[in-house]
Amino acid sequence: MKKKISALLLTLAAMCFGLTGCITNQAEKEEPAQKTEEDKNASEEETVTLELFWQKSNTEVIQEIIDKFEAENPNIKIELTATSSDTGKQIFQTRMATNEPMDLVQHWPSQAEFRAMCKEGRMADLSDYEWNDNIIDTYYDLSCVDGKLYSVPLSINAGVVAYNKDIFEKYKVEVPESWDELIEVCEKLQGEGVTPFIFSNGDKENCSQKFHIMTAAVADDTWNPYEFYVGMYEGSEDRIADNEYSEKAAARLYELSSKYAQTDTLGTNYDLSMQMMANGEAAMMLTGTWAQSDIIKNNPDFNLGMFAMPTDDGVHMLITGIDPCIAAMSGTGKEEYAAKFLEFISRTENAQIYTDHDKSPSPIKGVETDNPTVELVLGYIEEGKAIPWWRDYISTGVVSDEADIAQEFLMNGEMEKFLNAEEEIILRQD
């Protein structure tokens, strides 16, 4: 908020008329005039503290942006509340239920939970700020809820297979272009004593993500997982039990986890999986483009590549969306200060800081991405082979409950139980 500060200028004139010495002596004895309240307000601005609730692991880059913002705005302090990817949503939901809002919140604009809060008026409407023109039109539209902008998007992501190029080169294996070729790669690497995949099944959120990535991987020209699952939720009367693609996606996911991953997948969470990948303990990982910065953080010299999970006939689809966004919560009394921070992160030079760390494509105009793997994502988007993370468009209870059943499935492989539970969750109307 811009404040107009007016200073009271006092002009004192004294006519000595021969009494200069007396007047001077008396002036030396007088105390300086007390500052008025208006003078105090004019000389110093109130310091405002904003809480930013952050649910991703890349706290270093957001702290760097915060430090730069605070240097430019010394009267605004940002306190970063950082949580892990597998506990952040639960903490956030608890705070919302107990009416403990934060001033700024990192979330995902496609997720039903976030969209519901926007519709309830719990997020500040940013549509009328001129600075939101900094957002590329396509991603502006993806960030909107009912035609209104409630957040600033920071990057876009996609579900991919990350792989160690040095391992592939050492054992002379090529990037697979079909499911059968992928299994051949796994078998060859296993025969050489190399673990093909790292699975982070100790992080239930990752289990769910992997199932969604796989549903896109089994798609073809006749079946679109977004249309199928969201269509079920909206009343299409389609059912998973009658759909071969859902079972194929689940079966292939379980095959990779049970046959071609490290022994203790349940004892591996997201952070540990990043370290293991960076240390060369496996050749591949089913993850998202967001993992690149975490792998490189653990090993700056890591030779990383990415490819889309292949399907049977070479027709691939990529699951994608806006990764993090930052929104301002309403009713805090600090919305204008929070909007000032959002304007700051929407500037090209500051969004560039995030992209330089994250390595993912940016939704902010003018930001450059020096990353060959980004071409993979952009190519699928341009060819119309990209679909949204479909669970985000279903119900608010899906994220946590589906993560539970996905983790259980990867532990026991009970296909029918998993698919029935998946269907029940998708059809739920919260």
Image: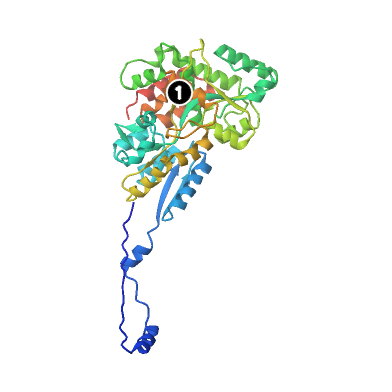
Q: Quadrant of residue 90 in the image?
A: top left
Q: Nearer the viewer, residue 14 or 394?
A: 14
Residue 387 appears in which quarter of the rendering? top left
In the rendered image, which residue does mark 1 sit on? 319
> Would you call the spot at circle 1 few (<14 residues within 10 Å), some (14-19), or many (20 or more)?
many
Residue at 35 percent across and 66 percent down: it is 40
Q: Which amino acid type is marked by label 1?
A: Ile
State left or right for residue 257 relative to residue 367. right
Q: Position of residue 192 (x, y in %)?
A: 70, 19
On the question of residue 319 being in view, the answer is: yes
Quarter of the image with the C terminus in it = top left
Viewer-nearest residue: 421 or 259: 259
Question: Viewed as shown, does residue 140 lie left or right of 56?
Answer: left
Question: Helix, strand or loop at disc 1?
Answer: strand
Q: Residue at x 53, y 37 (%)?
A: 356
Q: Give coordinates of residue 246: x percent, y percent.
A: 44, 16
* Percent position of residue 271, x then y: 56, 36
Question: Image check: 29 left or right of 408?
Answer: left
Q: Depth check: 313 or 352 in front?
A: 352
Mark count: 1
Q: Residue at x 30, y 83 (%)?
A: 15
Task: Name the outermost residue toward the front.
Answer: 17
Residue 226 in the image: x percent, y percent? 39, 20
User: In this rendering, is residue 334 above or below 124?
Assistant: below
